[in-house]
Amino acid sequence: MKIARALSVRFLWIDALCIIQDDEDDWSQEAQKMGTYYGNAWLTIAADDAPDVNHTIFPPKRKPAMWLDQGSTGARTTPVLLHRIPTHIDMTDSVIAGSFPSVRLFSRAWALQERLLSRRILHMGPQEVVWECSSAIRCECGRPTDVWFGTPLYDGVPFRERHHKALHSPRLANSTLRLDDYWEVMLAKYLSMQLSFDDDRLKAIAALAKDFKASDQRRAAAGAPPQLGNYVFGLWTQRLPASLLWDTTTVPSPHKPPVRNPNFPTWSWASIPGSWLYKTAFSSAAGYLDGFTSKSAVLEVPVESWDNTSSPTSLLPPRIVVQGAAVVTKCRCIATTTRAMSTGTSISREWKLLDISGGYGSSHVVQLDIEPRDDSTEMSVTCVEIAESTWGGNPRNTRYHGLLLEPSSLYPGHYTRLGTMEARSNWFQDNEAVMGEYSII
């Protein structure tokens, strides 16, 4: 309120006051308006390092400057005025922690879209005030704001400015930046952040997704081909089926496995907590993955919905029907690794697919979403070929990507996702894969 009055702003919206706390109906309505509130606000005030609503947002007063007498130079003395430099926070968009301290707000998943959708932000940091808008970042200490080990990141353009140009540049139709690639990079950052309630996994990024779609529609109106399509539970239909190949960045443990959220279909990354990574995010622009080619087709997708939760009264969960070559085989645990950690013991297991020869070869890698809760070391799976790619631009380094499924125990005739696989040789051709259609729920 002090800041609003100092700026002669008459109206102030505070989420902790304007949303009825512990009221699910009011929260459900207000969560869908977050993009409108932050996108249309004249100024957003960010309490960057406040641990709760009872903490002040103002940085503490710094010690006053003091004069230091350096001694005499001939007949003259040269006093120097010293100011204590405030702690400089990391304002980068790097998923990995930067070389400067970060703040609590930047670890919150909800804060990502609020930061990107706001026109301008006044960051009340731990020791300094920082101004951030779509064209600049300025801080009291005067140090570079988007730096990594003392050097500017990428082309030196700040995080917000790059995002604004990516989605709102007047030359969108001629832009070389692909929105679907940028979405997956943004998603990796979002999923590395903390979320108090897992049911909010899609709600906390819905407004940002709408902004992406609006940008795609503007590009299409300017004559560029669409890149996104419809938004279905965190995925874009134009990117299917490749975007089904999301992978976890952490190793699931059989002793403390994550739990699937029944409100989301298993083919959506939102169904499992944790940080996720798309292989397609490292496409040719980054030099890792080239020639990513779909080897399957999506025949049916859910209707676009921004509610992002399955109806408990629906007869069948939202499904995607994939047509592709598949192999029905066994998946076996061939090795168990135990690591002693400072916080306890970590156990991971290595899984392999049964070859047509009857062995478990080493030319492929299996990544399960969730390890079996029991001590089972073998299970039946259906492996559907999704895509192939080339690593490092070398055709000899072709990779073959598949989706691991199992028949649904609740809905006969349908499948649920188990994980992904990647092979260095044409595993599907070698194991006589057969074309079929698979309804994944």
Image (spheres, rainbow, N blue to C red):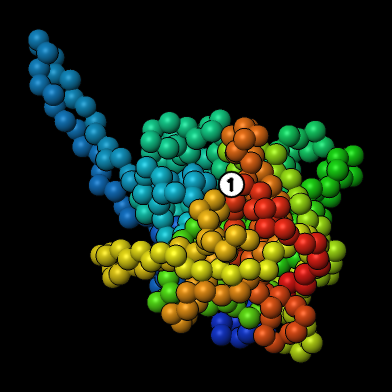
Q: Nearer the viewer, residue 409 or 427?
A: 427
Q: Quadrant of the C terminus?
A: bottom right
Horizontally, residue 241 falls left or right of residue 90, namely right
| Circle 1 SS class | loop
Quick one: which residue is furthest to the top in this view? 74
Q: Position of residue 372 (x, y in %)?
A: 50, 77
Q: Nearer the viewer, residue 349 or 303?
A: 349
Please report the residue visible at 37 percent of the width from the left and 44 percent of the height from the top: 100
Please report the residue visible at 48 percent of the width from the left and 39 percent of the height from the top: 146
Compared to residue 60, the image places residue 169 above or below, namely above
User: Which residue, given by chain and number where applicable, does mark 1 sit on?
Assistant: 424
Q: Nearer the viewer, residue 87 or 42?
A: 87
Give the quadrant of residue 406. bottom right
Q: Position of residue 158 (x, y in %)?
A: 55, 39
Mark 1 residue type: Arg
Q: Nearer the viewer, residue 191 or 84?
A: 191
